[in-house]
Amino acid sequence: MSFDVMMKLIMAQGMLGLNNGVFYAMLSLGLAVIFGLLNVVNFAHGALYMTGAFVALILNSYLGVWLGIGWLHIGFWPALIIAPIVVGLFGILIERFLLRWLYGLDPIYSLLLTFGITLVLQGLFINYFNASGTPYPGMPESLRGVVNLGFMMFPKYRLFVIVFSILVCIAVWFVIERTRIGAMLRAGTENPELVQAFGINVPRMVTLTFGFGTALAGLAGVLAAPIYSVSPLMGANLIIIIFAVVVIGGMGSIAGAVVTGLALGLIEGVTKVFYAPASNTVIFFLMVIVLLVRPAGLFGRQG
Amino acid sequence: MSPDTTAATMTKPLLKVSDLHAWYGESHVLHGINLELAEGQLITLLGRNGAGRTTTLRAIMGLVDRRTGSIQIGGAEYIGMPRHKIAPTAGIGYCPEERGIFSTLTVEENLMLPPVVGPDGMPLDEIFTMFPNLRDVRKRMGTRLSGGEQQMLAMARILRTGARLLLLDEITEGLAPVIVKTLGTVIRQLKAKGYTIVLVEQNFRFAAPLADRHYVIEHGEVIDVVEAHEIETKMDRLNHYLSV
Ligand SMILES: Nc1ncnc2c1ncn2[C@@H]1O[C@H](COP(=O)(O)OP(=O)(O)OP(=O)(O)O)[C@@H](O)[C@H]1O
Ligand SMILES: [Mg+2]
């Protein structure tokens, strides 16, 4: 294989890897935001991502039928706004009525609770929808087809997902690291008691943060719907990888979650070029190495 | 003598704490604290390590697991108020013993973090005149400051909010004499501007010339109250209370 061909292959797999990577980044970003302030490992994150995809699917293909309005199809662009709101509100209910009782207890309780929520959501969707997946037909016309990247023809929609997700990640990073709201969040993460004594309503901030983190999962779900088929188990497969990303990046680190998510997607893709069977395990291999060398993760504060 | 004998000579108190009990979990730390001070006054809480002075301030701020009794500020009752409403409603600024500078926030972010609680917050210009060192380190991360700078930041941060009642916990602890001197000047300026101040202090020599009255706390109770003009005559007693 010539060098030129090799490079093209690497870049092509890199792009596909990056496409997975943006999902890793967005989901681990939400997990990191939640873990930072709440100290809760939200196992339900994958199920909420799946719920976001289903909200998009329902809006497009089922709602009209259910309501007896045959012409009603709420498409991709509205879903991109509605689904994160629905999932975020659901997250707010979870925090307000379930998680809240578990603060101050061993973190294993909130992990178990969110694991339980995962099973309930999966069970519900398996009951009413095809367990092996339903295609989402709502991809907007303007994003169909391919673009020529020079080294490969790349689906337009996937390119959109990559660019859009990276912009979302940058925006979230900016808000948290550079704005007053972000300063309140960071301060609340460090010393919630003092922040509250200054007159900031920390419990409300916690609720909204959880809602925001889950809304990000919902958003990722909508973006995933046109690419992967919408299935009740789509989050279960992903959440394990996401946890690995979070562990490698460092629990609670915002930049760490994003950079690690993107990087691991890339690494996974490029590994396919050299030794395809290893591409599914390379992330876990890296996780073990990172845990041995830097137990707090690449971006986590050590000690 | 009873701790209340001085009350009659005072004008209407701005802060009046009566029979304040406080708990951390099951442990009962305050056993009926009584104290009061009028607007513009400065009192100190003196006592040995573990006497309950920090807890008294924390109980006023709602930072204990349970509290009973009465905390009146400007005539209104605060004992049942949720903690995030206390500072904005009462116009309190709280400077905790460990200073509470946030390490993931820049100096400027630390300074701007607490919400405004009163109408006449100190403008940034005036703050930087009072604490000139802070002006040059605005972009630095909060904990990359010296102890003295952190203490000044912790003070500046509450002055900006417009709080008129300041609860200051051991602000001189572990600081070099020159910085302690600066803080003394700052407290004197604040008093001249009419702030009302509760000062927890170990350093009696720092506190003595500033205070209108001293409360001696032991085992979560006020065991003596010493007016500023009584210091000379009661020096032996004070030394006895504070000796380790
Ligand atoms: N979080 C806590 N949980 C349980 N007990 C506490 C807690 N904080 C303080 N105490 C106890 O409450 C008592 C009063 O402590 P406090 O911090 O108010 O003392 P202090 O007068 O400020 O003394 P100093 O600051 O010099 O140590 C001490 O016996 C202390 O052990
Ligand atoms: Mg103390």
Image (cartoon, coloured by chain):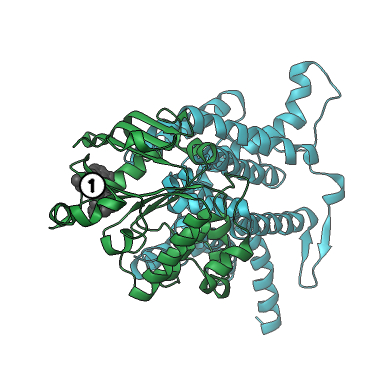
Amino acid found under the numbered disc labelled 1: Val
Q: Chain of mark 1?
A: B
Please indicate whether residue A276 sits to the left or right of residue A62 in the image: left
Q: Colour of chain A?
A: cyan
> Picture coordinates of residue A284 (x, y %)?
43, 60
Choose between B8 and B152: the one closer to the eye. B8
Identify the residue position indicated by label 1 in the image.
Answer: B216
Can residue B218 be spotted in the picture?
Answer: yes
Please indicate whether residue A143 sits to the left or right of residue B114 in the image: right
Q: Quadrant of the N terminus of chain A?
A: bottom right
Q: Is residue A88 above or below residue B237?
A: above
Please indicate whether residue B231 sits to the left or right of residue A38 in the image: left
> Picture coordinates of residue A232 (x, y %)?
57, 35
Q: Colour of chain B?
A: green
Q: Quadrant of the C terminus of chain A?
A: bottom left
**Residue A111 falls in which quadrant of the image?**
top left
Please indicate whether residue B6 sits to the left or right of residue A78 in the image: left
